[in-house]
Every structure is written in structure tokens, then in C-alpha cells.
Image: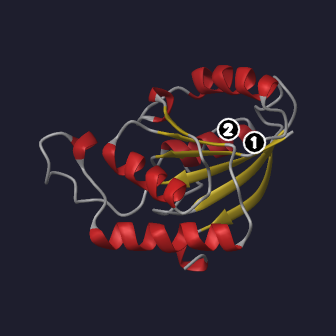
């Protein structure tokens, strides 16, 4: 079993303010709140073996803040976590990763509605667009052994950032 922490990127520049959506950075408020959330996670004694992030600027900046606050020494970019990324492809990656890192906690940083839908699928077997992850919010799942993630994961944490600030 592995604990998976699903984290949405912090508050970013408004849509349409950048030519390409992937270039939208965190705002100053987004940086500040994300830093506060990261510090609270450290206070709660969380530590991730790896932070895997979407390639979009706002997600990478969120992951870098988490790393800078001491939540993980390792950070990697993954196209699976880009908007409309493939849960199935990520699960194939995860199963390989889990073989060499059994029981290691993992954090992924990405985007809504994908992250909420992924969590629903991992817990209930299908996405219904009902689980909304706020910016800089955290979902915690326990994923069972290899190859058993779909509809067999357990939700143990769903926290909007206001409960972590």
C-alpha cells in the first residue's frame, strides 16, 4: 500500500491573461497561500518520496514551493498530469514506481477537474465530477498493492486550503 497525496496547484493568473494557458504562473497570493499550506503539511510531519508535477507553469511552481519547504528532495515533471492527462498511463507508471518504492508516499500536483475525477475513479471506479479540489487543496488516498488501484483505494483526507492555513 502507498499513500498518494493529490494536490491542486495554487492560485494562478486569470485565464486569458497569457497567450498560452500553460504559461500562467502563480499569483503572489497563490505563492503565499501555497507556502502556508506547505508549511502546515511539514508541521503535520508529511514527507513525500517524490513530488510528481504537471508540466504547466502554475503546477511546477506549486511543486517547487512544496519541495522548498522540505516536503521532498525529489521532484519530477510528468505529462500524465497535464490537463486531460491519462489516468491509465499514470497508473502504469505508478505500478512500476510502486515496485521499486513500496509503501513510499507520493505527491502529485495538477489540475481540476482531472485530479478530482482521478480521485473518484481510484476510490469509486468512476468519475462523476462531484469531487472538487480547491486551489492548493489536498486529497489523501491509500492505494492498495500493485494493479489494484481502480475502485480499491481509500480516501483518508480531503482538505481545502482554508483548513491548512
The x and y percentages for residue 136 are 49, 63
Count of numbered badges drawn on the protein? 2
Which residue does the numbered mark 1 point to in the structure image? Answer: 124
The x and y percentages for residue 59 are 41, 48
- Within 10 Å of disc 2 (Cα), the crowding (few <14, some 14-19, many 20+) is some
Task: Check disc 2 and report its element: helix, strand or loop.
Answer: helix
Q: CA distance from mark 2 to mark 1?
A: 5 Å
The x and y percentages for residue 98 are 77, 28
Figure quadrant of residue 157 = bottom right
- Within 10 Å of disc 1 (Cα), the crowding (few <14, some 14-19, many 20+) is some
The residue at the point 44 percent across, 38 percent down is: 54
| Left or right position of 37 against 29 | right
Marks 2 and 1 close (CB-CB < 8 Å): yes
The x and y percentages for residue 63 are 48, 50
The residue at the point 27 percent across, 40 percent down is: 22
Q: Nearer the viewer, residue 25 or 112?
A: 25
Give the position of the C terminus as an image quadrant: bottom right
Circle on res. 121 = 2
Figure quadrant of residue 115 = top right
| Left or right position of 149 against 64 | right
Amino acid at each position: 500500500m502507498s499513500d498518494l497525496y493529490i494536490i491542486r496547484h495554487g492560485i494562478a493568473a486569470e485565464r486569458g491573461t497569457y497567450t498560452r494557458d500553460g504559461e500562467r504562473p502563480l499569483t503572489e497570493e497563490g505563492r503565499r497561500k501555497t507556502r502556508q499550506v506547505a508549511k502546515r503539511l511539514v508541521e503535520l510531519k508529511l514527507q513525500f518520496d517524490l513530488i510528481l508535477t504537471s508540466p504547466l507553469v502554475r503546477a511546477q511552481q506549486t511543486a517547487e514551493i512544496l519541495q522548498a519547504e522540505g516536503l521532498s528532495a525529489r521532484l519530477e515533471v510528468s505529462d500524465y498530469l497535464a490537463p486531460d492527462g491519462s489516468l491509465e498511463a499514470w497508473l502504469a507508471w505508478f505500478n512500476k514506481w510502486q515496485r521499486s518504492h513500496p509503501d513510499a508516499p507520493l505527491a502529485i500536483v495538477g489540475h481540476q477537474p482531472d485530479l478530482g475525477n482521478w480521485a473518484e475513479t481510484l476510490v469509486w471506479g468512476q468519475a462523476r465530477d462531484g469531487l472538487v479540489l480547491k486551489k492548493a487543496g489536498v486529497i489523501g488516498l491509500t492505494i492498495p498493492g500493485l494493479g489494484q488501484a481502480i475502485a480499491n483505494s481509500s480516501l483518508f483526507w480531503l482538505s481545502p486550503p482554508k483548513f491548512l492555513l
